[in-house]
Structures are given as C-alpha cells and as structure tokens.
Amino acid sequence: MQKLIVVGGKRLRGSINISGSKNATLPILAASILSKKKVIIENIPLVKDVETMIDLLLLLGSKIKLDRKRKKIEILNNNKLNTFVPYKLVKTMRAGILVLGPLLARYNKAKVSLPGGCAIGSRPVDLHLAALRKMGVNFKIRDGYINAITKNGLIGNKITFPKISVGATENTILAACLAKGKTILSNCACEPEIKDLIRFLIKMGCKIKWVGKRIIEINGITNPKSLSYRVMFDRIEAGTYMIASAVTGGQIKINNIDPKIIKNEILVMKKMGVLIIVKSKSIMVRSSKYIKKVNLKTSPYPGFPTDLQAQIMVLMCGANGVSKIKENIFENRFMHIPELNRMGAKIIIKGNQAIIQGKKKLHGAELMATDLRASVSLVLAALSSKSKTIINRVYHLDRGYENIEKKLSNCGAQIKRIE
Ligand code: UD1
C-alpha cells in the first residue's frame, strides 16, 4: 500500500493552479444521462472519485472519450443504458447515488446499491428517497439495493427538504428536469457546485431557475440538447493550499479561482492574521508570524465548509490561544484529531466541538489517513512540522486531490510517495 513521506519545515513559495471541482464534476457526469445527444465536459479533475463515476457510466453503457491531457470528456448516451448500479461502484464513492434521479427520469426505473456506512458518519439517503417518492417513485429496499420504479413517469411536485442536503438537492433537480410539469424545491442546498450543475443543465436546455435563496423551480422538458461545459474550480482544493501556505510560513499564489466564491474562507483566514491579496482570478496568501485564535462552526454554504474543517484545525494548532470548531454537518468528522495529537497537537473533543490549544509545535510521526479531508490535514500538519512524517493509506487522498505531491513540491515541499 502506498505511503507518503513528508519532510516538514520548508517555507512553501510559488504558485498553484487549482483543478476543476470534484464535487461539481460528479453530479454533472450523472446529469449526462439525461441527454441522448453529445455532452462535452471540460476542466474535469482526474481524481479517483471522478474515475469511479466514469467507470459507473461505462458500466451503464455510456460511450465515453476521455482526453486526459486536456481534462476533457465526451459522453454519448444515445443508446439504451443499463439501470443497475452495483455495490462495488457505490461503496467507495457515495456520489454514485446521484445517477438514481437521472436514470428514473429517463427510464422510470433503476436499481442502485445503497451506499452504506462511511468513515465520517452514517450518511443515509433518506432525504433523496423521500423527495423522489413525492414525484411518484415507489421504492423497495432489498438485499442492500434500492429498487425504484415509477409507473406513470416522474411527476412534478412541491417538495420541501426537512434538512439541507447537497446530494438530495442534486438528485431531485436531476429527476425533475424530465418530469411532467413543474417542481418547486424548497430548503435546497445552495453550494456553488449546485449552482454549477444548474448552469450546466440550463445549457442542456432544462428549464430551471432560482426563485429564492433556497428555492428552485424546474419545469420538465422532453428533449435535452447537446452541450459543452467547463466545470468550476475546486474551492476546497483552493482552501487547502491557502492553509498550506499559512502553516508553512510561506507565500503561495493560488490561480484559476473565483475569489468571490470563497470569500468566507478568505475572511476567516484574514481574521486569523494571514495576509491575503485578492485579484480577480487569483489570490496571494502570505503567512504571518502571529496566527490568531478563532472560533468557527461548519454549516451549509455560504457558511464555513465541513470539507475544510480538518485543514483549518492545523492552522489553529499554531494560533496564539484556544480555538474552537463546532462540526455541524457530519457526526464523526474528527478522526484526524487523534493523529494530530500524536504529532504534538493538543486538541480535545467535546461532543461535536473540538477545542484546540494553540502555540503547539508539531513534530513528525507515522500516521494513518482515514478519509479524504482528514488525510490532507495530516499532509498540512506534516509540512508545518520540523521533521519527517509517514502517512499510510494515502489512497484516501487520491479520491479528491489531483497531483498533490507535484503541486506542493513545485512550491518547495519535500514530499514523495513510496510503495
Ligand atoms: C456533499 C459533498 C461532501 C460535503 C457534503 C457537505 C459531494 C460529492 N460531496 O456530500 O464533500 O462534505 O456535501 O457539504 O458533493 N443526510 C441525511 N439524509 C440524506 C442525505 C444527507 O440525513 O438523505 C445528512 C448527512 O448525513 C449529513 C448532512 O445531511 O449529516 C449533509 O449531507 P449532504 O449535504 O447530503 O452531503 P453529501 O451530498 O453526501
């Protein structure tokens, strides 16, 4: 199994080009199922989750041309697709569930494996199913599979999500695009990746509009068009490298982004004393000697993202006092904490709150990566320390970070992968 060896203590300097967004690419790939015409998607990140979604589409029968060099994919779904998604393609990547809505929209039936547990919590799909049920879908859960069928096709309805969910909002939008009549979705997630998905769908000819901050209106259509679309930048990757600069006393220019989308993260880091110069498509992030403590809570967009919680915690370890983070989205997303404590951090967990003692100098250790964002927080901690760290199970990192070793070593980091 591959490991990462990181020798910390280097001030990172240089520039990093941010890749396309993983969390926008996944639902957009699922959305390609809606059209029988050619779909071209550009700026896709070649990370493991995206590869898994491509494998899933291939298994369904999509005709795919992937140009790895240009990060461009062409998909043609003009044939009859399978409607069965096996466990092996959903167990490592929950986003596989996002094909449920499009398959139902096109074929009125689908059999998709239940995603099952996940390291960061139970992560159910009840909200997805409840919304689709309101559009006329009958579900039978048997042997770990969701058997979905709609006798008279999907029918538009008024649906209010009881809780904000990114995936449930996406799945229901995708189903509603080809449903009969009008669907109004309330209490939707409004993450930038959902806005990106909607821009893609509008370009495909779907009739969708935001009619309130968390309200979306969709009028079903019958014949989606061919289109070419460029996916937005990965805001979590951008945030991660901002923190990499801050924790190493570095100076990194982060390119290919829209700073407006991450203005909350920029604000939090400025509040902590990090120096940030904002341009129209890039930012310069310069560390400061005095990182200030801060209290944070994770919440749906535009709040602070749960996907950056583990990374910002590493910056808090070097702050001038006690910082606190409340994790409001996932129930078990503190698995990086025992590993950070093994590196000399002093973090205690009280329920869904982490209390982080500042002024801690981290040292290297042999560590275990547990999930995608926890793994990258260990890389950041290793870069900020003065010695050598070995990180096991790095496959978690490959699910969401494209060329991470190359991007960091181009800025002077000493990081390599070994078998
Ligand atoms: C997406 C992102 C993930 C991010 C998360 C929250 C993708 C591919 N993944 O995950 O990186 O961390 O949003 O920003 O875009 N829930 C239910 N029932 C459901 C669905 C969700 O109870 O049917 C709960 C979850 O357990 C969690 C909360 O709702 O506590 C939010 O989850 P959700 O927004 O659905 O996350 P994902 O779409 O899985």
Image: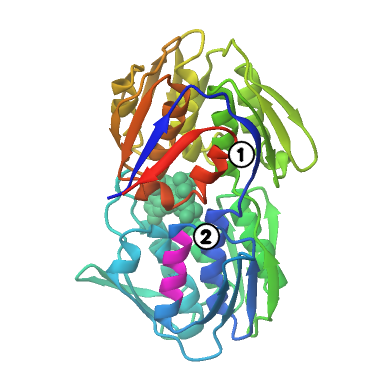
Q: Nearer the viewer, mark 2 or mark 1?
A: 2
Return the residue at label 1: 302
**Mark sitting earlier along the chain (2/1):** 2
Task: Indicate whether residue 229 is drawn in magenta.
Answer: no
At horizontal 65% and vertical 60% (from top left) the residue drawn is 231
Q: Main secondary structure of the magenta part?
A: helix
At horizontal 35% and vertical 44% (from top left) the residue drawn is 371
Residue 230: name its quadrant.
bottom right
Query: Crowding at label 2, few (<14), some or many (≥20) Cα neighbours within 10 Å?
Result: many
At horizontal 57% and vertical 67% (from top left) the residue drawn is 68
The answer to whether residue 326 shows anywhere in this view is no
Q: Is residue 80 left or right of residue 343?
A: right
Where residue 187 appears, as percent x and y from the top left, is 55, 50
Residue 146: name its quadrant.
bottom left
Residue farthest to the right, as pictured: 280
Whether the residue under disc 1 has CB within 8 Å of ligand 1:
no
Q: Nearer the viewer, residue 362 or 235?
A: 362
Whether the residue under disc 2 has CB within 8 Å of ligand 1:
no
Where residue 303 appears, as percent x and y from the top left, is 57, 35
Is the image coloured rainbow, by chain, by secondary structure, or in one colour?
rainbow
Numbered label tally: 2
Q: Nearer the viewer, residue 222 or 412?
A: 412
Q: Which residues are magenta?
A: 49-57
Distance between mark 2 and mark 1 Cα atoms: 27 Å
Label 2 SS: loop
Q: Nearer the viewer, residue 147 or 251?
A: 251
Marking on residue 46: 2
At horizontal 44% and vertical 78% (from top left) the residue drawn is 58
- Amino acid tagged 2: Leu
- Amino acid tagged 1: Pro
Marking on residue 328: none
